[in-house]
Image (tube, grey):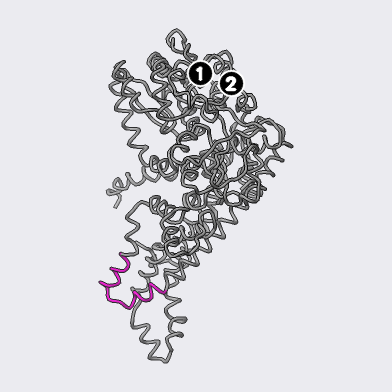
Amino acid sequence: MRKKYLVITAALSLSLTFAGCSDSNSEEANQGNVVKVYNWGDYIDEDVIAQFEEETGIDVIYDTFSTNEEMYAKIASDPSLYDVICPSDYMIQKMIENNLLSEINWDNVPNIENIDSLMMDRVSDFDPGNKYTVPYTYGTVGILYNTSMVDEEITSWDVLWDETYKNNIIMQDSVRDAFAVALKKLGYSLNSTNEHELEQAKDLLHEQYPLVKAYAIDEVRDKMINGAAALGVIYSGEYLYCSEENPDLAYVVPEEGSNLWIDGWVITSGSKNKENAEKWLDFLARPEIALKNFEYITYSTPNVAAQEMIDEEYLEDPAVFPDEEIINRCEIFQYLGQEMEDLYYEMWKLVK
Amino acid sequence: MNKKKWLSTPYLIWMIAFTVIPLLLIGYYGFTTRDGSFTIQNITAIFSPAHSKALLKSLYLSLLCTVVCLLLAYPLALILKNKNVGQGGFVIMIFILPMWMNFLLRTYAWLNLLDDGGIIERIFSLVNIPYQSIIGTDAAIILGMVYNFLPFMILPLFNVLTKMDENVINAASDLGANSFQTFIKIILPLSLPGIVSGITMVFVPSLTTFVISDLLGARKIMLIGNIIEQEFSIADNRHLGSGLSLVLMIFILASMALINRYDKNGEGNAF
């Protein structure tokens, strides 16, 4: 999910869309041995792509997206545009329900045994029977805070409503993540479909509005590194990078609970290169490849064999690899259906 | 004449493909629900609190921006009118020069200038003046709008003022008008086409912008452009997005009508 390009890159890439189209068309013309990959921006070590091409002789056509929703709109319009994509939990569920994914032939992906079986269990929450998903990364949503600007120990979401941090808070600018914070603070499920609960969460977020310095997604990372704010709501995968750039930054998953998210690779229902796609999945689940990607993107990997090669220091840091106690108070997002999605968004517009 | 008709074919195709069909699509989506049945809810949705608030905010900010642009551009155009062609052209070029660079990059540059830890803050701290970033406030958005759209006000005003017949002004002073009277009774009415054209060219893009508010508003300020953009990109609801676009189009058509009324000869056109 969650390393995305800056707004500007996204907007500039719009102007490159035409060039991009003609590119992949000409690639299609020689219809050789290809696999079309659609991933989050900056979410893989590019050396891995080159290594895959060298080893298998398959050409990788690689494109990136910046939100689940943007990716969904594209795949829904034509599922054969890409072979493999990397959405998040609730989006995988939505795509399964709308017949946009294709079941994986696990015989072709033997490396799936490297993935934590506990993780496969959790994936079955949104992918019943583990038919579609090879988990890629996982993590939590929490508060990144600057210890040189915050004296107290932070344990609760309440701090995001504390007047002393007025104009010092950066809030997530995405509907589900923002509502998850408010719903959890109120003690409700972050998959709530109760209109009354959502109403309360909306009021709470509206109350927070004057304290918020900025709503952001990608920029939370840079703003926190620059010390532009004391507190920011962020994905755990960003923490390692942030703390290396600015050692004052610490990460906490508040005790009321939070969101546990899982990003995984899936094959589209329109895939024309399914076997190549399965080779791609198998390749990424290889321990040394998973390790390489972890070192580059710093998002926790569910690959147990890769974890064995990772420094103890990281493995024992609950901010990087959340422990059972943290995971147990977190919930995975579920796809709540179009009507609920519209209601969430309707409420979100009233917050600002 | 008819023999040359085929020459217009490319333009016809262009207009059909890039104007007529998209408009029909917006019309279709605007009046349908997700399952394809007819509705006017996407249009009446403008009256819901979130949408009307964003629309009023957009109207307020774009009107303010237009006034500021007019107040800045008119005196400048008056000064340039009295310069010779070369000097005037040079100054105009200075004002247009930034437009050679991508609009997005220029706005992004303002973000870097104004943001915490930005260049302006560093300069202020050198001379020990406390600096409070204006990013995320109305002021930042007005600044971004004025900066980006000012040339669209200067050009039509400059055009209309330089083309004005000097003899008319001379006649006014011969007949005893002082410079204030000349301005109010002669120059201002004659430059009206330029003013109206400039107002429209500033008002319309600032009413519909979402990039400026996105970058300089810290995503705290939702303009109607942001609402529409996010209906497409985030909410996956092109029906509501199209409906709101149709409402916004009414405001744009109204300003077009205004232009046609005052600027029949196209004198105020910028280019």
Residues under numbered marks 2 and 1 in contact, where contact means CB atoms less than 8 Å apart: yes
Please give the name of the residue rendered at 34% of the width and 75% of the height, measured from the top-left corner: B81
Instruction: Indicate the position of residue B130 as horizontal and vertical percent values.
Output: 50, 62
* As drawn, A89 above or below B16: above
Can residue B153 be seen from the camera position used here? yes
* Viewer-side residue, B53 vs A148: A148
Instruction: Indicate the position of residue A224 as horizontal and vertical percent values.
Output: 50, 44
In-image side of B183 versus B220 (left or right): left
Mark closer to the chain start, 2 or 1: 2
Q: Amino acid at mark 1?
A: Thr
In-image side of B149 versus A183 (left or right): left
* As drawn, A188 above or below B202: above
Judging by the rendered image, the residue that carries numbered circle 2 is: A126
* Viewer-side residue, B156 vs A194: A194
- The outermost residue toward the top is A107
Chain holding disc 2: A
Q: Amino acid at mark 2?
A: Phe
Can residue B40 be seen from the camera position used here? no
SS class of the residue under badge 2?
loop
Q: Residues within 10 Å of mark 1 (few under 14, many from 20)?
A: many
Question: How far, Cα to Cα, is label 2 from label 1?
Answer: 10 Å
Quarter of the rendering containing residue A25: top left
Instruction: Indicate the position of residue B262 as horizontal and vertical percent values.
Output: 46, 68
Quarter of the rendering containing residue B138: bottom right
Residue extent of the magenta highlight: B75-93
The numbered mark at residue A75 is none
Judging by the rendered image, the residue that carries numbered circle 1 is: A133
In-image side of A110 versus A32 (left or right): right
- Tell if the residue under mark 2 belongs to the same chain as the one under mark 1: yes
* Viewer-side residue, B83 vs A13: A13
